[in-house]
Image (tube, helix red, strand yellow):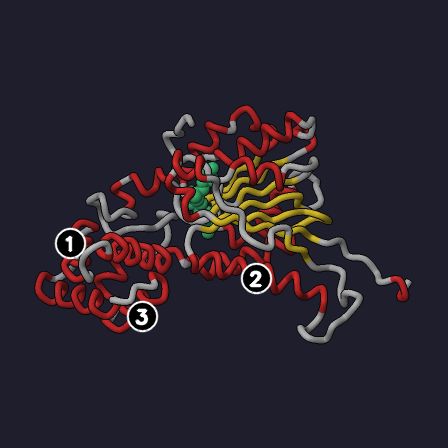
Amino acid sequence: MVHDRFHDPVLVTEVVAFLARKPGIYVDGTLGGGGHSLALFQSLREAGYSDQSLLIGIDQDDAALKEAAEKLKEYKAHSVLVKGNFQDIGSIVQNACRSRCLAPKVAGILLDLGVSSFQIDTAVRGFSYLRDGPLDMRMDSNAPLSAADIVNSYEEKDLARLIYRYGEEPGSRRIARAIVAWRQQHGSVKGTRELADIIRGNAYGGDRVVKTLSRVFQALRIEVNGELDVLRRALYKGIECLDDYGRMAVISYHSLEDRIVKTVFAEQARNDWGPKGVGLREPLSYGAVSLITRKPIIATPEETEANPRARSAKLRIIEQIPLRVPHDEV
Ligand SMILES: C[S@@+](CC[C@H](N)C(=O)[O-])C[C@H]1O[C@@H](n2cnc3c(N)ncnc32)[C@H](O)[C@@H]1O
């Protein structure tokens, strides 16, 4: 595998096989370095569909947009790259389509959640406990809340709650207490290395230290970027944008994200059959979605070996079912 200096995309073959099936509008809500988008468009081109297709690429990170623009320059005439949050997918699609006189009906949506390797590796962004940088963690550098605001101003009980909820860290109270004690003694926590040292000194030993570090950093990142709320909104809005038989694919990297994707997809698929236990033989409504993946797709051992990031990836896909009028109402 040839590594991309910005980010190695995960489950690319699977994403392309399930999404790139016809000409149309494709939305990459997490453009990153553009790896998935490039593979998707190459596949559309091989099938002779690229001239009639449009890629709408969204990212809230300026560095990602710059990298993706370079990677996708060959497809410039067929792509629109937008700085924005994927929770606004509805209005972003409307605007991009209006200026091209296209109906805002999308053939495929991809959300590849979380942060890119480039963001993690850039110390100044503050995402990594392995690098010394400011407590930032904002994907959108114009966003108002940074990790420093949380670490240095949240009350102990709120810190503990957030580390428990978003990091699923059993020692959350102990870590929160240590952070607040540090603040009282030193004024503030100055950067990622200082925070990592506080966590190391208060994690329950052994293998748990690395897990605790990644859980606390994950919790802060989720809070800074409102990740779970925007994901929920994007799933509902994304489904509304889908064309008949359009598909939405989501790759998640931890259980909190995957639980949301699984629940929203299952709930939308169930709409079709009314309340549980009624035992309908005909679906109630015909405008819902069907699950393409009942169980998530995971990476092969070969991919995991080449790209450790793929280890925790879970891909779930749904398909829009066209709105039909039941026979007896015709
Ligand atoms: C895992 S990377 C995607 C990598 C990409 N698939 C590729 O092939 O390079 C996730 C990207 O999504 C962006 N992102 C995460 N949450 C977002 C959101 N709510 N709105 C817009 N972009 C988001 C991040 O800034 C990051 O660039």
Q: CA distance from mark 3 to mark 1?
A: 21 Å
Query: How far apart in space, not on screen, are marks 2 and 3 (Cα)?
Result: 24 Å
Which label belongs to residue 264? Answer: 2
Find numbered disc 1 in the image and state the secondary structure of the residue it sits on: helix
Image quarter of the C terminus: bottom right
Instruction: Report the quarter where the N terminus lies.
Output: top left
SS label for mark 2: helix
Residue 277 appears at what percent x and percent y? 68, 75
Position above or below: 261 against 97: below
Q: Which residue is mark 3?
A: 161
User: Which image quarter: residue 154?
Assistant: bottom left
Q: Image check: 86 left or right of 178?
A: right
Q: Are marks 1 and 2 in contact (CB under 8 Å)?
A: no
Q: Nearer the viewer, residue 65 or 44?
A: 44
Q: Which residue is mark 1?
A: 197
Residue 26 spot, x, y in % from top left: 61, 40
Between the C-alphas of marks 1 and 2, the distance is: 38 Å
Residue 239, image x, y percentages: 63, 55
